[in-house]
Amino acid sequence: MSNWLTSTPTVTPPQRDPADVAPSESYRPADPVWVYRDGWRAGVIEAASPRAVTVTYKPGTHRGTGVDTFTAPYVTSRDDDDPTLDNRGLRLVRRKPLAS
């Protein structure tokens, strides 16, 4: 069962071999994934349960993101880097100290 892909998947969820579909609870927060929403989109796992995953993903070509819940056939692992989604927790934010 090879679930790691190096590029955008080419088959739709109904065409996927069930043996290649990882259970939703096998994903962990921050895992890079592809999700199927009007085509395959880059995403990052936010939460997982035995029934579904919650994913932040890029719904289009713009820099904005969406958050949605997907069942296992609509999700697969992603190797490709996406600079707008990956390593979001590593960005540093410079804050001005409060004036006393």
Image (cartoon, rainbow, N blue to C red):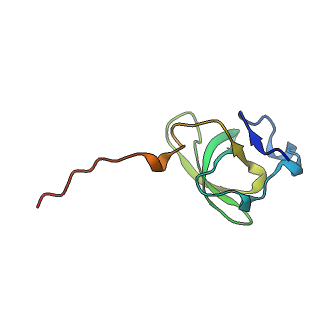
Residue ranking furthest to the bottom = 50
**In front here: 74 or 83?**
83
Residue 84 locus on image (x, y percent): 51, 39
- Image quadrant containing the C terminus: bottom left
Residue 83 locus on image (x, y percent): 52, 37
Residue 33 locus on image (x, y percent): 66, 46
Instruction: Evaluate whether residue 36 shows in this view.
Output: no
What residue appears at the point 37 percent right and 46 percent down from the top-left corner? 92
Q: Is residue 61 above or below residue 94?
A: above
Instruction: Tell me: 83 left or right of 50.
Output: left
What residue appears at the point 29 percent right and 47 percent down from the top-left corner? 94
Q: Is residue 52 above or below residue 57?
A: below
Where residue 26 sits, quadrant-wise, is bottom right
Instruction: Tell me: 45 left or right of 19.
Output: left
**In front here: 4 or 64?**
4
Q: How many marks?
A: 0
Residue 4 locus on image (x, y percent): 75, 42
Residue ranking furthest to the left = 100
Instruction: Evaluate whether residue 42 shows in this view.
Output: yes
What residue appears at the point 65 percent right and 40 percent down from the top-left corner? 41
